[in-house]
């Protein structure tokens, strides 16, 4: 019986990890479409000619939208659990770790694998992947990638903490109102 329970829990964790990674990737792609379509409304120059502005514009959306979308899905999962249980916290921690892994490692690995077919990008990891990504996403260009990764990580930690604490504050207020 205990072995069956551990097996079910492990498959649940693996499935949730795959769902989180897939949803983050989908939100990342949708963010690219949104940012590319709206960029021309704010700038007269194409993104590849005005990297000093475009990396901030694209970076802002790519720091906000994929994380908020994936986090909202995680909060829907968390709502089914007892308020502030260990499982709630573990689901949010898992969401944070998986989104960071996909953002910082998965995208760079896939781009590096795609760049292997083009000799002008080189063979180094992650620079060749960043070179390929720089063609469309200006925050991956040299000089901007390190500030983007640092800022993205800091902002995502703040975002996850703010959502968790806001969720906790909101539901503790509802619980007190129900007790009256």
Image: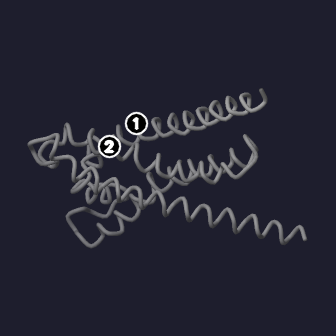
- Residue 51 quadrant: top left
Is residue 155 left or right of 174 when viewed as pictured? left
At 67% from the left and 62% from the top, the residue drawn is 13
Left or right of 121 on screen, residue 176 = right
Near mark 2 (Cα within 10 A), the count class, few <14, some 14-19 or many ≥20, is many
- Position of 174 relative to 24 (above/below): above
Position of the C terminus by quadrant: top right
Residue that numbered label 1 is attached to: 151
Q: Residue furthest toward the left? A: 44
Residue 115 in the image, given as x and y percentages of width and height: 29, 66
Q: Which residue is mark 2?
A: 59
Contact flag, marks 2 and 1 (Cβ < 8 Å):
yes
Quarter of the image with the N terminus is: bottom right
159 or 49: nearer the eye?
159
Residue at figure coordinates x 37%, y 56% from the top left: 126
Element assignment for label 2? helix
Give coordinates of residue 161: x percent, y percent: 57, 35
Q: Going 40% across and 43% down the picture, which residue do you hit?
A: 64
Quadrant position of residue 177: top right
Vertical placement of 40 versus 20: above or below?
A: above
């Amino acid at each position: 019986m205990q072995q069956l329970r551990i097996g079910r829990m492990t498959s649940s964790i693996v499935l949730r990890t795959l769902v989180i990674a897939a949803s983050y990737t989908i939100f990342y792609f949708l963010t690219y479409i949104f940012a590319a379509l709206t960029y021309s409304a704010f700038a007269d120059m194409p993104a590849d000619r005005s990297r000093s502005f475009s990396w901030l514009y694209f970076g802002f959306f790519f720091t906000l939208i994929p994380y908020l979308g994936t986090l909202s899905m995680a909060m829907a999962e968390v709502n089914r659990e007892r308020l502030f249980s260990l499982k709630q916290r573990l689901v949010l921690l898992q969401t944070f770790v998986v989104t960071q892994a996909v953002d910082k490692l998965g995208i760079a690995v896939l781009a590096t694998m795609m760049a292997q077919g083009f000799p002008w990008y080189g063979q180094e990891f992650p620079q060749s992947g960043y070179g390929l990504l720089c063609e469309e996403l200006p925050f991956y260009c040299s000089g901007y990638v390190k500030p983007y990764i640092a800022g993205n990580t800091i902002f995502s930690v703040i975002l996850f903490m703010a959502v968790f604490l806001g969720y906790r504050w909101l539901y503790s207020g509802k619980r007190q109102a129900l007790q009256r």
